[in-house]
């Protein structure tokens, strides 16, 4: 989709526009630290918001909506508890996982999703690759604009937790990750600026050898 | 006059509704012992005061003044930064991409809001919004113009879409006339937007300066 209008950067923007936004950030970090679900589940929950609402809501409104929804789905809280603002059923095993002051530094570093794998990479730097035309109902990190496109591998980034799999069946299923360059014209057509290159970080299951296609 | 009734969706009531929902979730989780309010407060304080673009600015300034650090940074930014005693630790898979006379780098997350917050702080609203996310990958020159940056037609543009856990930090070009400045003073002139790629610290040929 296009036609979203001006970017309209705000000068000297505060970190949070309202105190409630700050609470949402703090809650999100604390909830993720429980380890009951991960960032891929959180992202997919946001992608599942109805488009008209997604575009209308502010960033942190999306966050509180999906945090609440996922917390209910994963039985962290119930709707009744939220309506009454009263916690009733307590799972001691979750209490044990609570982010503490001692471990707070975990919320200050980006998570590491690289995993050990014996798999050999299928592609090398310089290889021409074609992204698959895949449109799963679940979660994927292959952007729509980069499906079915010819690109070049410019870097190998190791083997990482595969988001599509995490959301689909809860398995980490580590896959090789590649940075792939595409010319602007390959992505957008001949009217595109010939000086534009766009890269994505693509998991191996997104990629084909063009000669096999 | 508009009568207030339970279907009123004016801006004030929807703001109150959000505040209620935030309060309800935090309150219930706290009562159940699943989150610690003091920890939430500390997290907020960290993101409001401790982490921010001043970290990235120091990385850029050291890159400009120390060629050994620059080489290490371009090879593996995470390892290079974490090897420096006076920089806070950063997360894995941070990649530094350097602007040159011929190449201008810009970072985006079209899918959500992935951002190198450990070196730049939390992302601004525009970075996380539909116009930037959708337009910078197709018409970057027009988007940069909205930021007041005019890139000559001869400059190549590389847009890095952060679709996985790799994070990108743009190293802007060192402005002319700063040869006499020490690292600490150089860090003061590096802006957040120049490390995303929506600003530069000097105009390229064909620009306004």
Image (tube, rainbow, N blue to C red):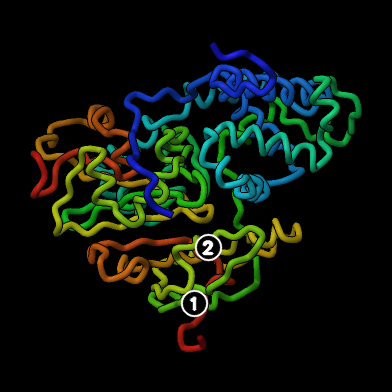
Outermost residue toward the top in this view: B1
The quadrant where residue A102 appears: top right
Establish if A60 lies above or below B106. Answer: above
Q: Is residue A128 above or below residue A177?
A: below
User: Which residue corresponds to the image point at 48% horizontal and 37% vertical from the top-left?
Assistant: B118
Q: Which residue does the image show at 27% across and 34% down from the upper left? A: B190
Q: Pick the residue in front: B83 or A51.
A: A51
Residue sitting at x 49%, y 53% = B166
**Few, some or many C-alpha atoms within 10 Å of disc 1 (few <14, some 14-19, many ≥20)?**
many
- The mark found on residue A142 in the picture is 2
Circle nearer the N terminus (2, 1)? 1
Secondary element type, mark 2: loop
Residue nearest the viewer, comparing B72 with A167: A167
Does dot 1 land on a helix, a strand or a loop?
Answer: loop
What is the distance, in whole Å, between disc 2 and disc 1 at their CAs? 17 Å
Looking at the image, is A132 positioned above or below residue B51? below
Lateral position of residue B109 relative to residue B207, left or right = right
Does residue B42 show up? no
Q: Nearer the viewer, mark 2 or mark 1?
A: 2
């Amino acid at each position: 989709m296009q036609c979203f209008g001006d970017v309209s950067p705000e000068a000297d923007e505060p970190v949070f526009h309202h105190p409630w936004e700050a609470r949402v950030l703090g809650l999100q970090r604390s909830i993720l630290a429980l380890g009951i679900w991960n960032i891929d589940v959180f992202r997919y929950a946001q992608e599942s918001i109805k488009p008209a609402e997604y575009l209308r809501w502010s960033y942190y409104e999306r966050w509180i909506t999906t945090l609440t929804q996922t917390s209910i789905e994963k039985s962290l809280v119930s709707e009744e508890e939220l309506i009454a603002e009263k916690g009733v059923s307590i799972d001691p095993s979750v209490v044990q996982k609570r982010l503490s002051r001692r471990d707070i530094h975990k919320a200050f570093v980006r998570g590491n999703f690289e995993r050990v794998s014996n798999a050999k990479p299928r592609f090398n730097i310089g290889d021409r690759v074609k992204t698959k035309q895949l449109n799963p109902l679940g979660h994927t990190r292959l952007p729509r604009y980069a499906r079915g496109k010819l690109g070049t591998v410019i870097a190998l980034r190791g083997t990482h937790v595969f988001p599509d799999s995490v959301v689909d069946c809860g398995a980490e299923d580590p896959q090789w990750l590649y940075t792939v360059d595409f010319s602007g014209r390959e992505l957008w057509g001949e009217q595109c600026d010939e000086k534009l290159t766009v890269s994505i970080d693509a998991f191996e299951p997104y990629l084909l050898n063009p000669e096999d296609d | 006059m508009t009568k207030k009734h339970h279907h009123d969706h004016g801006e004030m009531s929807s703001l109150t509704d959000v505040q209620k929902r935030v309060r309800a979730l935090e309150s219930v989780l706290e009562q159940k012992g699943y989150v610690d309010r003091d920890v939430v407060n500390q997290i907020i304080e960290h993101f409001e005061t401790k982490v921010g673009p001043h970290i990235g600015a120091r990385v850029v300034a050291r890159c400009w003044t120390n060629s050994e650090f620059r080489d290490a940074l371009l090879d593996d930014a995470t390892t290079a930064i974490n090897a420096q005693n006076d920089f806070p630790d950063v997360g894995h898979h941070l990649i530094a991409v350097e602007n040159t006379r011929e190449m201008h780098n810009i970072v985006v997350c079209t899918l959500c809001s992935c951002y190198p917050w450990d070196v730049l702080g939390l992302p601004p609203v525009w970075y996380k919004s539909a116009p930037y996310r959708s337009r910078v990958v197709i018409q970057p020159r027009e988007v940069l113009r909205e930021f007041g940056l005019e890139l000559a037609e001869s400059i190549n543009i590389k847009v890095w879409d952060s679709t996985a856990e790799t994070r990108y930090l743009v190293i802007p070009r060192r402005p002319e006339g700063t040869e006499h400045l020490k690292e600490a003073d150089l860090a003061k002139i590096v802006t957040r937007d120049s490390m995303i790629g929506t600003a530069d610290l000097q105009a390229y040929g064909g620009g306004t300066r």
